[in-house]
């Protein structure tokens, strides 16, 4: 979509609203999709009941207008 979306990586911060919650509990906007979770040596495909744990590296595609929201929800960049 003409550069309107970005592929980003975020690390789930222990103090973030997402830590310890499932994907469906964190209420991401429709314009943001979690693509993968890298946990230790595992690649997980996120589903609604997948728990996010502090330290997880989350790969997401998000509309550029929601990048700040994603950072606030999950945590810092890689």
Image (cartoon, grey):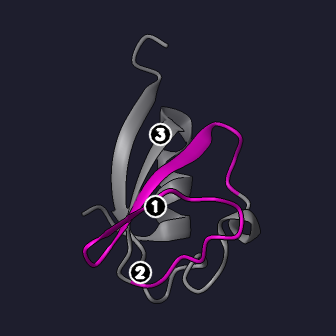
Compare residues 24 and 26 and report the one nearer the observer.
Answer: 24
Q: Quadrant of residue 47?
A: bottom right
Examine the structure image and report whether residue 73 is included in the region drawn in magenta.
no
Looking at this view, is 8 or 53 the one in front? Answer: 53
Q: Secondary structure at mark 2?
A: loop
For label 3, the SS is strand
Q: Give the mark, 2 or 1, whose residue is nearer the N terminus.
A: 2
Residue 2: give x, y in percent of width and height: 43, 10
Q: Secondary structure beneath disc 1?
A: helix
What is the x, y in percent for residue 49? 70, 70
The correct choice, above or below, for 54 with respect to 72 in the image is below
56 vs 74, left or right, is left
Asked if residue 75 is positioned above or below residue 5 in the image, the reply reads: below
Mark 2 Cα within 10 Å, few/some/many (few <14, many 20+)? many
Q: Residue drawn 48% across and 34% down?
A: 64
The label on residue 7 is: none
Q: Magenta stretch?
A: 28-54
The answer to whether the residue labelled 1 contacts the one labelled 3, judged by CB atoms less than 8 Å apart, is no
Residue at 64% over, 36% down: 31
- Residue 71 - label: 1
Residue beneath label 2, please?
13
- Which residue in the protein does label 3 denote? 61
């Amino acid at each position: 979509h003409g550069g309107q979306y970005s592929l980003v990586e975020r690390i789930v911060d222990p103090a973030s609203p997402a830590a310890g919650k499932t994907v469906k509990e964190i209420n991401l906007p429709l314009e943001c999709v979690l693509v993968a979770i890298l946990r230790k040596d595992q690649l997980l495909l996120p589903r609604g009941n997948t728990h996010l744990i502090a330290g997880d590296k989350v790969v997401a595609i998000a509309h550029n207008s929601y990048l700040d929201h994603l950072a606030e929800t999950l945590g810092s960049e890689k």
